[in-house]
Amino acid sequence: MSHTNQIDVLMLMGSDSDWDAMSKCHALLDELKIPHDVHVASAHRTPARVLELINDAEKRGAKCFICAAGMAAHLAGVVAAHTTRPVIGVPMPGGISDGLDALLSTVQMPPGVPVATVGVGSAGAKNAAILASQIIALTGDDMAKRVSAWRTAQADQVAAKDKKLQEKLS
Ligand code: RP5
């Protein structure tokens, strides 16, 4: 994606080792046709780059941020400190308690600087994309229709799985 283009979402990961889980978020943003950029940038290892990316994304119209990090997962909180746009935090597995450390680091923000924190790992990564789409849908009818269609497709899949189970059990 060209850096002169408008984007709706900036997705940041603290490390390329977060890609395994976060590729699910990227795929879902693509499926929902949400223009977005993805970068590796760390609150601890490359703090100046994180600020540069936030400023660039705001200029290009980003409506919200999705930030994934593990261990002492401060990326989402640092981004939230530098923008008034919604920040979704995705705690990554690994670390001393396989993601519980990252969950607490992400969710336990001081009052005044919220991070909308989703679950640990790939389930959280998918929910981050859906939550971003719901935020964007507030100001876009097409996006709202795509979110509804995605929900309906999900419900259809559950119904199909139940049908299969009932057939197996009968
Ligand atoms: C965090 O530390 C990253 O987000 C990653 O989840 C974790 C480990 O990073 P690497 O050592 O794999 O680069 O900052």
Image (cartoon, rainbow, N blue to C red):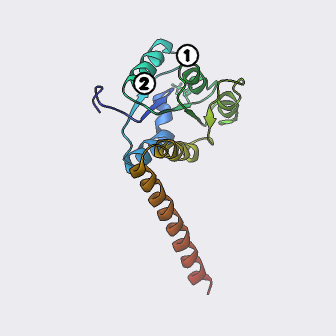
On-image quarter of the C terminus: bottom right
Q: Position of residue 17 (x, y in %)?
A: 49, 32
Q: Is residue 137 above or below residue 8?
A: below
Q: Quadrant of ligand 1?
A: top right
Q: Is residue 115 above or below residue 119?
A: above
Circle 2 packing at 10 Å, graded few (<14), some (14-19), many (20+), is some
User: Residue 87, which numbered label?
Assistant: none
Q: Position of residue 1 (x, y in %)?
A: 29, 33
Q: Position of residue 20 (x, y in %)?
A: 48, 40
Upstream in sequence: badge 1 or badge 2: 1
User: Residue 44, which numbered label?
Assistant: 1
For the point 46% across and 58% down, which residue is it? 150
User: Is the shortest distance between ligand 1 and the CB of mark 1 under 8 Å?
Assistant: yes
- On the rendered structure, is 108 left or right of 9? right
> Residue 96, located in which quarter of the rendered image?
top right
Circle 1 packing at 10 Å, graded few (<14), some (14-19), many (20+), is some
- On the rendered structure, is 62 left or right of 2? right
User: Is the shortest distance between ligand 1 and the CB of mark 2 under 8 Å?
Assistant: no
- On the rendered structure, is 154 left or right of 113? left
For the point 53% across and 66% down, which residue is it? 155
For the point 36% across and 27% down, which residue is it? 60
Q: What amino acid does circle 1 point to? A: His
Of badges 1 and 2, the one in the foreground is 2
Instruction: Give the structural element (helix, strand or loop) at label 2.
Output: helix
Q: Position of residue 122 (x, y in %)?
A: 54, 45
For the point 50% across and 69% down, which residue is it? 156
- On the rendered structure, is 33 left or right of 169? left
Q: CA distance from mark 1 to mark 2?
A: 21 Å
Say which residue label 2 marks. Answer: 58
Residue closer to the observer: 118 or 112 = 112
